[in-house]
Image: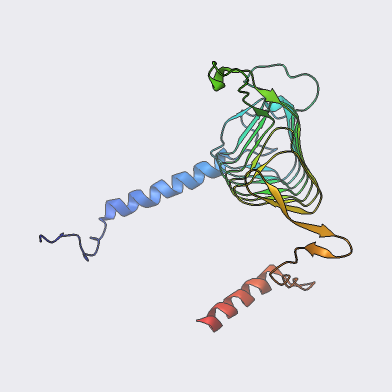
């Protein structure tokens, strides 16, 4: 059996010019990320209805249109390749009111999409993992003879309450209404109404855990609650503690 010359062989050292090129490419890319980020002070070509202080859209951005009908709260974190659209296509007059609103402190993970033809509201301090899809419009399929993509879509407003967590790949469909502090499991497909403090999972999503003021979580949580950070602890002290634990474990 012929031996592969690459089997168990070590990579040859890079030449000096490859190393220089490698460093230069990374420096240029980091520079482009810094320069291409969108903020209230540096909106670039994007003219949002409003963009709060401390909000940042990472570069490169995804598809963004209908900005005059998009309002972004303060201290939002919008990762790379996030799509934010208001209206079915660019250039439409959508009237006097906002169509897409993000509250203060909303986080949208890399590659997420919010497609707002009807009103979409995301409450403050809602966190979304990567590749979350939120839409107020969906294709209809009433006519069995017409391609689905050519049939007129149906739209319904979407409301996501404050303090929610949407896991990676979650989908929120038109007409969904999520309450406060709702957890949506990764890959779940949500439609309809979800009450406050519910945990939903599956496709279609169903409630798998809920909070009762008297009995607590039902069914009970399987993990102990995290230990809170004591008051007065500085970031430097936390880093030193983490380093001490790393050395102790090693």
Q: Quadrant of residue 99?
A: top right
- Identify the residue at the far left of this view: 1
Q: Position of residue 22 (x, y in %)?
A: 36, 51
The residue that appears at 81% across and 58% down in the rendered structure is 211
One can see residue 51 in this view:
no
Q: Report how many numbered discs are placed on residues in the image.
A: 0
Residue occupying the point 53% across, 38% down: 60
For the N terminus, the image quarter is bottom left
Which residue in the rendered view is the most extreme toward the bottom? 248
126 is higher (above) or lower (below) than 152? below
* Lateral position of residue 74 relative to residue 15, left or right: right
User: Which residue is outermost to the right?
Assistant: 214
Who is closer to the viewer here, 46 or 65? Answer: 65
Q: Position of residue 245 (x, y in %)?
A: 59, 79
Q: Nearer the viewer, residue 10 or 35?
A: 10
- Coloring basis for residues: rainbow
User: Going 71% across and 25% down the picture, which residue do you hit?
Assistant: 155
State the image coordinates of residue 20 (x, y, percent, origin top left): 33, 52
Residue 58's image quarter?
top right
Task: Name the side, left or right, on which 13 lies relative to 232.
Answer: left
Q: Is residue 77 visible?
A: yes
């Amino acid at each position: 059996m012929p031996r592969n010359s690459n089997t168990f062989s070590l990579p040859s050292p890079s030449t000096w010019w490859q190393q220089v090129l490698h460093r230069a490419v990374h420096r240029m890319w980091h520079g482009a990320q810094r320069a291409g980020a969108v903020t209230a002070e540096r909106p670039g070509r994007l003219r949002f209805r409003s963009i709060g202080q401390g909000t940042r859209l990472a570069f490169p951005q995804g598809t963004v249109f209908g900005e005059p009908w998009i309002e972004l709260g303060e201290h939002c974190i919008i990762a790379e390749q996030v799509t934010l659209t208001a209206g079915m296509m660019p250039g439409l007059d959508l009237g006097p009111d906002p169509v897409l609103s993000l509250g203060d402190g909303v986080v949208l993970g890399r590659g997420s999409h919010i497609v707002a033809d009807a009103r979409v509201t995301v409450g403050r301090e809602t966190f979304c993992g990567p590749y979350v899809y939120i839409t107020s419009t969906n294709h209809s399929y009433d006519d069995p003879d017409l391609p689905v993509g050519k049939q007129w879509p149906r739209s319904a407003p979407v409301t996501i309450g404050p303090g929610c967590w949407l896991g990676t790949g979650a989908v929120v469909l038109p007409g969904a209404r999520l309450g406060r502090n709702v957890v949506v499991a990764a890959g779940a497909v949500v439609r309809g109404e979800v009450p406050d403090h519910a945990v939903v999972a599956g496709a279609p999503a169903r409630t798998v855990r809920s909070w009762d003021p008297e009995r607590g979580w039902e069914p009970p949580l399987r993990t102990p609650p995290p230990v809170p950070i004591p008051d007065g602890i500085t970031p430097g002290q936390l880093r030193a503690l983490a380093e001490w634990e790393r050395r102790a474990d090693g």
